[in-house]
Image: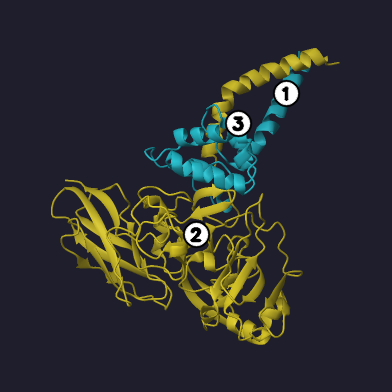
Chain colours: A yellow, B cyan
Amino acid sequence: MVSRRSFLKDVTGVVAAAGAIHPLLNWAAENAPVVIPGEDGLIVRSARFLDLEMPSEFFDSWITPAPHFFVRNHMHEPSTLDAETWELKVSGEVERPLTLNFADLVRMEPHTVTNTLECAGNGRAFQRPQVPGVQWQKGAVGTARFSGPRLHDILQRAGVKPTGKHVMFHGLDEVPGKVPPFIRSIPIEKASDEDTLIAMRMNGEPLTRHHGFPARALVPGWIGAASCKWLSEIKVLDKEFDGNFMKPGYRMPNHPLKPGDPLNLDDTHPLTALSVKSIIAGPIDNSNSPSHSIHIHGAAWAGEADIVKVEISTDGGATWEAAQLGRDHAKYAWRLWSHNWKAPKAGDYTILSRATDSQGRTQPEIAEWNPSGYLYNAFDRVKIHVEA
Amino acid sequence: MWKRSLRVAFAVSLLALCSLPLLRAQSPELPAGPAQAKVTTACTECHETRIISQQRLSKAAWTKEVDKMIKWGAVVDPADRDSFIEYLSVNFPPDKAPEQMPRVVAAKKR
């Protein structure tokens, strides 16, 4: 029989050994392969809540496969998601409140929109001074074909009253602690746009859990946060929703701020469409090139506008050369671009990219600073060393 | 003798089981310091440690974050608030190098 004393002695010995191996366990936790079903190769910004970033090498595909598509969760994912019992309520300033189920939505006429979805905080890590939030670099963005009924058709079925001015989305995100629920609204004009969808499919497949199964809003050209996932309620309001994720969250100052200036909330507006932006996917920052022939490539997008030009500078912005835009394009989708450059001699170079859109906006050298690091869109830049 | 080996094996299994949540959560430990344990308990109730350790903020910015999280339900004894802010601003200041993040490994490749 094992005496309590001898058992405790053994356990004590093992626990003492554990003290020694504890750093090892922590090393293992830091370096353990992170396996998240359905995802592949993404950078883990957070495993709980799930925030996954697309690394630069996946900017090589005009359509981003779901396993490579960034994931941004504000809260815990719904613990149960069952298409059989799922319901979507439509209420508020409507003549006929509705409760739709999965089959009801599947029966409605589907539409497909190829959309570049970008988190408003993409690029936040490059803001100086630094700001709090998920430290996204280049890849909180991706392009997919989203399909589902038009929100307009659903709203028409419910009959929007003349008092209905904004449309609120509420998802099934599970709220921890006293965190305000993730609820946002968009103006009725955008909600009624023929391209605004209640998406049920992504790249021809049902939405995956991480992307909002069974249905999500898809507000094309706008910040990702507008496209609420795990949608459970659509409510038509007479004014903009005023919860945390509309105010103070996801707002931009009406006038540029100096870095470090506080935000006066009365002098702000909600974020809507994305900015004009390009990123360099290759060469990789701080890489060596054994060859003087450099293939520079990346992607550029502009929310509701079209990309008309991407330019590259290899001399610190003194001169610019036009990059070649990729063949694939769609109204709200990014353009891939590439440029072949011959380095004149061995040495260190900084490659810059800047995009211009159909609204005449050009990517600025320095992004407009704001306390949450939204819509970062400064020239992208990578440093390379060209070997002799 | 074999009984003792069994007992040690049992104790090792117990330890392994206790360590499992650490590995499963795939959430690295926060740096050592006076408030490490309390910060870990209060913050990881809702989210993992990387959300904290990737931030590079001034003391003023950390103060705002701690107060926001207390408002949002983080259980922090008012007497510990200042030590939380001190710990976070010492360990995750603006001039620290960016954190290196792991990649997701596809399930099928394992």
- Image depth: mark 3 or mark 2 in front: 3
Q: Position of residue A357 (x, y in %)?
A: 32, 74
Kind of residue sitting beneath label 3: Ala
Kind of residue sitting beneath label 2: His
Q: Helix or strand or loop: what does disc 2 sit on?
A: helix
**Which chain hosts label 3?**
B
Left or right position of A126 against B106: left
- Which numbered tag is attached to residue A68? 2
For the residues bearing labels 3 and 2, Cβ distance under 8 angstroms: no
Q: Residue at the spot x=54%, y=31% of the render?
A: B83
- Image depth: mark 1 or mark 3 in front: 3
Residue corresponding to mark 3: B37
Q: Position of residue A4 (x, y in %)?
A: 82, 16
Residue nearest the observer in this picture, A245 or A122: A245
| Location of residue A316 with respect to A199 vertically, above or below | above
| Location of residue A305 with respect to B39 vertically, above or below | below
Sequence-first tag of 1 and 3: 1
For the residues bearing labels 1 and 2, Cβ distance under 8 angstroms: no
Q: Position of residue A56 (x, y in %)?
A: 39, 56
Q: CA distance from mark 1 to mark 2?
A: 42 Å
Examine the image and state in which quarter residue A267 appears.
Answer: bottom left
**Which chain hosts label 2?**
A
Left or right position of A196 against A296: right
Crowdedness near tag 2: few (<14), some (14–19) or many (≥20) residues, C-alpha within 10 Å: many
Crowdedness near tag 1: few (<14), some (14–19) or many (≥20) residues, C-alpha within 10 Å: many
Residue nearest the observer in this picture, A329 or B97: B97
Left or right position of A381 against A45: left
Residue corresponding to mark 1: B11
Q: CA distance from mark 1 to mark 3?
A: 24 Å
Residue A119 showing in the rendered view: no
Residues marked 1 and 2, same chain = no
Q: Position of residue B107 (x, y in %)?
A: 58, 51
